[in-house]
Amino acid sequence: MSGREAYLELYLAHRAALVDYAAPIVGDRARAEDVVQEAWLRFSAAAEKERAEADRIAQPIGYLYRIVRNLATDVARRLSADSWAEASPALDEVEAPGVDPERQAVDRDALRIVAAALAELPPRTRLAFELHRFGDKTFAEIGRQLGISQTRAHNLVQEALAQCMLRLAGPAEEIPSANVSSIGGRGAPAVADDDS
């Protein structure tokens, strides 16, 4: 049996499970069927490439599931964006807001308060928050990067968010000035173990 036939047999053996895996992500079985079909096309193209380069897909089932997950996530994002675009008014129908100096001042004060709240956090808590809120990292990615569990990463981000909300709710006169440009900067602090 050739490599392509073996991969086809593997795909057919796992096809139903792949559809079951994709269905909750995309929202229905018909879309999941499309995702799995597209995954097979990409998987078979990779198998052909591997054969031409004498490489070997180390874990073909895992690779197939990864392709399905990535495609399903792309479809779900596209559907979410499409539904949002349909629900929101056309841009030419929305009147552009004018520059409101009072609103700008309020927003600037809020940003200063958040910067001060973040500056008070332990370095690892602040870094977890910045990675999540400004770096679009998942809790799992943050956990791997910081060497902590996904749950702990979630807790650190929640602690930081709670601190920011607490400071925003309090009187602004007690908040010392902070360097607003330091929020979300690429020069994140080094990871410290002072908050476990």
Image: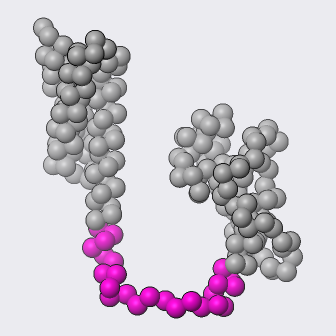
x 66%, y 79%: residue:
107
Of all residues, the one furthest to the front in this rendering is 53
Q: Is residue 36 magenta?
A: no
Q: Main secondary structure of the magenta part?
A: helix
Judged left or right of residue 178, residue 89 is left
Q: Which residues are magenta?
A: 83-107
Q: Where in the figure is residue 30, as x and y percent of width and height?
A: 15, 49
> Is residue 75 visible from the viewing direction of this image?
yes
Q: Where in the figure is residue 29, as x and y percent of width and height?
A: 19, 47
Of all residues, the one furthest to the top in this rendering is 1
* Picture quadrant where residue 169 is located: bottom right
Judged left or right of residue 150, residue 112 is right
On screen, residue 168 above or below 195? below
Q: Where in the figure is residue 83, as x and y percent of width and height?
A: 29, 67
Identify the image quadrant of the N terminus.
top left
Q: How is the image coloured?
A: one colour
* Picture quadrant where residue 105 is located: bottom right
On screen, residue 142 above or below 118? above
* Picture quadrant where residue 56 is located: top left
